[in-house]
Image (cartoon, coloured by chain):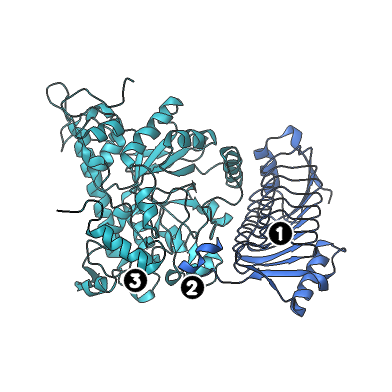
């Protein structure tokens, strides 16, 4: 009889903790099954709704962000952005490839803990500069060089916690940028050093506006926990854009127990955030970016239908770069690295060993030899392809729902396949008009 | 050249900062009637001299990379936060998180500093004539902090490579901070800093040096009780 309390994975986890004497650290996001966008389906057009011609009629994807307080808005060709990932967690080549891909398709990338690299600024036509609690590598000249500023309060993988960058990834360049001793296990702060509550945050946001002539949109990023309150406080503090990162959001390295047990699913977070903005009368005026486990164009379309103005992708963008592939491209040749995955105790398709810095395909590493395995130009081509494919999927679904703009997708276009998803997304269970929890 | 007078009572913060930004290197400006205004003289890169004639609010001189600023009064949170260069001198006392994450330059506080002065410090110099509150130098990575009076609880908690000198008493040290022997180089550095700051009440040979024990740089289970 299977043991549901102590299945083999739990037994292995207990053994690992007993061996280590501390929590386990890994990359990626939550692995556990939680209600997600797969639990929703579109109610596309039929007799009561008219579809647009899939290959003939246009469907707008342009996305404007951040004009609320008169800043120069971020003008994106597609509603899919690249989430903040640090140089440090990622190699310089990986950051450069993401920037090149985003620029090719007309979207933005985001810096991360540790600051902005010249390669990233050059590669990314539109670059969002993060201000994190650690302030590693945070520089006013980079603030001015950015196109928007994102104040990070929390992250879906570890809301309430700081980042980690283990010593093997704190090489000379990373250490220099962060003003840290080389090779130490860097554990980032979880609170900003110069403000605490939302009243202080309002002044902090004003400081950034003063320092940038009011030209840069200010995003505030939240890990999805008390979403309703947090979104309203971020807006009250002056955010032009609110970014909400659900529990499936990824990380370069943090405690496994944190990843799996903190925050709420993206599916629930997006609707709560959208409703918070609606209650404030600021829907569409303050834009909502949602992230955390976005993988497909269908996920993007469902997030937009539930109220997001755009989404951010992190892990999916890394996968498009080549993360978890069995080989890397060297000129015309694919070089198999399955053995390198095995050295990390994992295999292609299952790897989350980002924290080790020994990434077999050269993405999450600071080892020069490993980093050279990533052909930035080739990887950028793949990411651009992926972003184009996602966009095609979104517009395909939007047209089928009769929408000439992907931002016109709405909750009424959706039904849920499970009671949990119906309750979280606040759309009817398929085949019924029942929304659990609605109507008291 | 006579200083430019900027009457804060008649201008928005954006207008004040825009006026300051337009001044040529070498110019002087006096901001009158600040009345606790936040975000004065932030993000400036020109090499000018600014006097704020009264009490001011949060983040005065923050993100600065050029100007020298004197405040004839007290200031709120985050004086000189993320400073890159220049000298900020506060004639009175300062509230929390003075010089937070400052990379360069010198911040002189002629009065006392509240909690967490020098938090997340990244290479600047902070000189406090009077007392400093709890958690001064919290997670300070690089740079020098001089306290002319007493230091509160958990001084230098989670220090990296920053060094703290204290002339008065220390209530307690934070995690991974330690008392360290004062060398001749330290005395010379403190003497020079006292000269820059204009502090005459400190005997450089008698300060207490605090730096990092570097026991928490690498993560092991043995550290669980240290936090």
3D distance between C-alphas at marks 3 and 2: 15 Å
Q: Distance between the residues labelled 1 and 3?
A: 41 Å
Chain letter for mark 1, please: B
* Chain identifier, cyan in the render: A
Q: Can the viewer see residue A311 in this picture? A: yes
Helix, strand or loop for disc 2? loop
As drawn, the label of residue B86 is: 1
- List the residue tagged with mark 2: A183
Relative image position of residue A8 (x, y in whole percent): 22, 59
Image height of A188 relative to A268, above or below: below
Question: Residue drawn 26% across and 41% down?
Answer: A35
* Residue at mark 3: chain: A
Judged from the image, the secondary structure of the residue bearing numbered disc 3 is loop
Looking at marks 3 and 2 on the same chain, the residue that comes earlier in the sequence is marked by 2
Q: Are marks 2 and 1 in contact (CB under 8 Å)?
A: no
Classify 10 Å Cα crowding around label 3: few (below 14), some (14-19), many (20 and above): many
Q: In the rendered picture of this protein, how many numbered marks are placed on residues?
A: 3
- Most extreme residue toward the right is B200
Circle 1 packing at 10 Å, graded few (<14), some (14-19), many (20+), is many
> Marks 3 and 1: in contact by CB < 8 Å?
no
């Amino acid at each position: 009889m299977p043991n549901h309390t102590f299945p083999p994975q739990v037994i292995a986890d207990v053994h690992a903790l007993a061996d280590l004497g501390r929590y386990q650290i890994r990359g990626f996001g939550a692995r556990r099954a939680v209600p997600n966008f797969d639990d929703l389906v579109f109610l596309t057009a039929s007799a009561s709704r008219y579809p647009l011609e899939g290959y003939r009629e246009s469907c707008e994807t342009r996305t404007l962000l951040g004009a609320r307080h008169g800043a120069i808005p971020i003008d994106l060709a597609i509603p899919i952005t690249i989430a903040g990932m640090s140089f440090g967690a990622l190699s310089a080549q990986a950051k450069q490839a993401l920037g090149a891909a985003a620029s090719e398709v007309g979207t933005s990338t985001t810096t991360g803990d540790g600051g902005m690299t010249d390669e990233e600024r050059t590669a990314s036509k539109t670059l969002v500069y993060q201000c994190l609690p650690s302030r590693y590598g945070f520089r006013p000249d980079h603030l001015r060089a950015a196109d928007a500023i994102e104040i990070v309060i929390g992250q879906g993988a570890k809301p309430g916690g700081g980042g980690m960058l283990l010593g093997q990834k704190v090489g000379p360049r990373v250490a220099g940028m962060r003003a840290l001793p080389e090779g130490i296990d860097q554990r980032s702060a979880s609170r900003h050093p110069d403000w605490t509550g939302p009243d202080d945050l309002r002044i902090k946001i004003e400081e950034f506006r003063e320092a940038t002539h009011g030209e840069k949109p200010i995003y505030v990023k939240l890990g999805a926990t008390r979403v309703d309150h947090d979104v309203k406080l971020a807006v009250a503090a002056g955010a032009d854009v609110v970014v909400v990162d659900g529990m499936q959001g990824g990380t370069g390295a943090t405690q496994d127990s944190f990843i799996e047990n903190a925050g709420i699913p993206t599916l629930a977070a997006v609707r709560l955030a959208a409703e918070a903005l609606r209650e404030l009368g600021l829907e569409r005026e303050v834009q909502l970016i949602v992230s955390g486990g976005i993988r497909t164009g269908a996920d993007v379309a469902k997030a937009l239908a539930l109220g997001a103005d755009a989404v951010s992708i992190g892990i999916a963008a890394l996968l498009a770069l080549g993360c978890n592939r069995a080989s890397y491209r060297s000129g015309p040749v694919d070089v198999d690295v399955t053995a390198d995955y095995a050295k990390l105790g994992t295999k292609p398709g299952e790897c989350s060993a980002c924290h080790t810095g020994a990434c077999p395909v050269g993405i999450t590493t600071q080892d020069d030899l490993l980093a050279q395995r990533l052909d930035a130009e080739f990887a950028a081509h793949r990411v651009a392809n992926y972003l184009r494919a996602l966009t095609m999927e979104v517009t395909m679904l939007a047209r089928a729902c009769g929408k000439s703009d992907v931002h016109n997708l709405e909750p009424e276009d959706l039904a849920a396949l499970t009671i949990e998803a119906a309750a979280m997304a606040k759309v009817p269970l398929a085949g019924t008009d029942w929304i659990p929890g609605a109507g008291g | 050249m006579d200083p430019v007078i900027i009457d804060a009572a008649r201008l928005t913060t954006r207008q004040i900062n825009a006026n300051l930004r337009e001044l040529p290197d070498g110019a002087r400006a006096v901001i009158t009637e600040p009345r606790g205004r936040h975000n004065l003289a932030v993000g400036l890169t020109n090499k000018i001299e600014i006097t704020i004639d009264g009490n001011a609010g949060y983040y005065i001189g923050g993100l600065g990379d050029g100007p020298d600023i004197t405040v004839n009064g007290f200031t709120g949170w985050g004086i000189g936060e993320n400073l890159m260069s220049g000298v900020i001198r506060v004639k009175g006392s300062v509230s929390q998180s003075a010089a937070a994450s400052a990379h360069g330059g010198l911040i002189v506080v002629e009065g006392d500093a509240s909690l967490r002065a020098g938090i997340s410090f990244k290479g600047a110099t902070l000189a406090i004539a009077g007392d400093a509150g709890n958690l001064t130098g919290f997670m300070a990575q690089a740079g020098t902090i001089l306290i002319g009076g007493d230091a509160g609880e958990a001084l230098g908690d989670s220090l990296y490579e920053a060094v703290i000198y204290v002339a008065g008493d220390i209530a307690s040290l934070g995690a991974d901070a330690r008392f360290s022997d004062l060398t001749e180089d330290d005395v010379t550095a403190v003497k020079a800093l006292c000269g820059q700051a204009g502090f005459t009440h400190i005997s450089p040979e008698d300060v207490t040096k605090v730096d990092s024990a570097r026991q928490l740089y690498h993560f092991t289970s043995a550290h669980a009780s240290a936090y």
